């Protein structure tokens, strides 16, 4: 009889304990989170080294470096055409030009990219265009590539 009472007591204890676990309260939570975006920082275009060898009608390669100061990679979607200004020696504006470039590549976050462009001297360049350095203003369009 004692054995039977002990078994019944154990079963009752499990039933009560199981009932307590079953009766535990549940709840849910709701609300919102908040994040912010960064801002973009403009890049710079710098000459790598000036190319030489221009003469009337000639085309030469020259290189520029474009920086990406941003915390994310960027794609260089375009580099504008360049047109020379009047030089100190009096060589006319527009004597040297470079064509626009599209889809030039990708620059990693905080990195730089070097690009080879073409420059052409007009076939009718004047004598005062000899031994001159030509600056070609350029603009690059960069888009996030993350």
Image: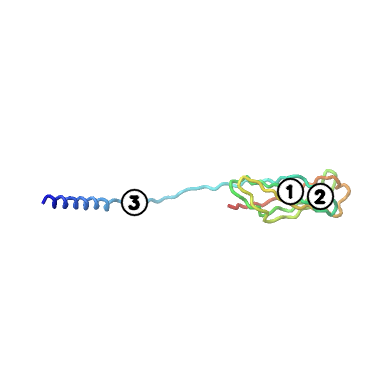
How far apart are the two marked residues, 3 and 1, measured between alpha carbons?
64 Å
Q: Would residue 35 appear left or right of 74 to someone viewing this image?
A: left
- Mark 1 element type: strand
Q: Earlier in the sequence, mark 3 or mark 2?
A: 3
- Mark 2 element type: loop
Task: Return the x and y of residue 15 as percentages of the image width and height.
Answer: 21, 53
Q: What is the quadrant of residue 110 in the picture? A: top right
Mark nearest the camera among 3 and 2 is: 3
Q: Are marks 3 and 2 in contact (CB under 8 Å)?
A: no
**Can you identify the residue that label 2 sits on?**
93
Q: Earlier in the sequence, mark 3 or mark 1?
A: 3
Task: Return the x and y of residue 4 as percentages of the image width and height.
Answer: 13, 52
Q: Earlier in the sequence, mark 1 or mark 2?
A: 1
How far apart are the two marked residues, 3 and 2, measured between alpha carbons?
75 Å
Quick one: which residue is furthest to the top in this view? Answer: 88
Residue 119 circle label: none
**Can you identify the residue that label 1 sits on?**
63
Task: Return the x and y of residue 125 as percentages of the image width and height.
Answer: 86, 52
Q: Are marks 3 and 1 in contact (CB under 8 Å)?
A: no
Q: Are marks 1 and 2 in contact (CB under 8 Å)?
A: no
State the residue in front, 19 or 99: 19
Q: Residues within 10 Å of mark 3 (few under 14, many from 20)?
A: few
Q: Would residue 116 appear left or right of 56 to someone viewing this image?
A: left
Q: Residues within 10 Å of mark 2 (few under 14, many from 20)?
A: few
State the residue in front, 11 or 60: 11
**Can you identify the residue that label 3 sits on?**
27
Name above or below for residue 103 compared with residue 65: below
Q: Residues within 10 Å of mark 1 (few under 14, many from 20)?
A: some
């Amino acid at each position: 009889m004692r054995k039977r009472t002990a078994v019944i007591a154990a079963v009752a204890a499990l039933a009560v304990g199981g009932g307590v676990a079953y009766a535990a309260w549940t709840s849910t939570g709701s609300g919102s989170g908040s994040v912010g975006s960064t801002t973009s920082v403009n890049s710079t275009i710098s000459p790598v080294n000036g190319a030489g060898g221009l003469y009337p009608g000639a085309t030469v390669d020259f290189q520029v470096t474009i920086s990406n100061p941003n915390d994310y990679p960027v794609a260089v979607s375009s580099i504008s055409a360049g047109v020379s200004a009047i030089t100190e020696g009096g060589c006319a504006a527009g004597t040297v030009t470079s064509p626009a470039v599209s889809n030039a590549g990708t620059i990693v976050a905080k990195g730089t990219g070097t690009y080879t462009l073409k420059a052409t001297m007009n076939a009718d360049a004047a004598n005062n265009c000899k031994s001159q350095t030509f600056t070609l203003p350029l603009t690059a369009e960069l888009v996030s590539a993350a």
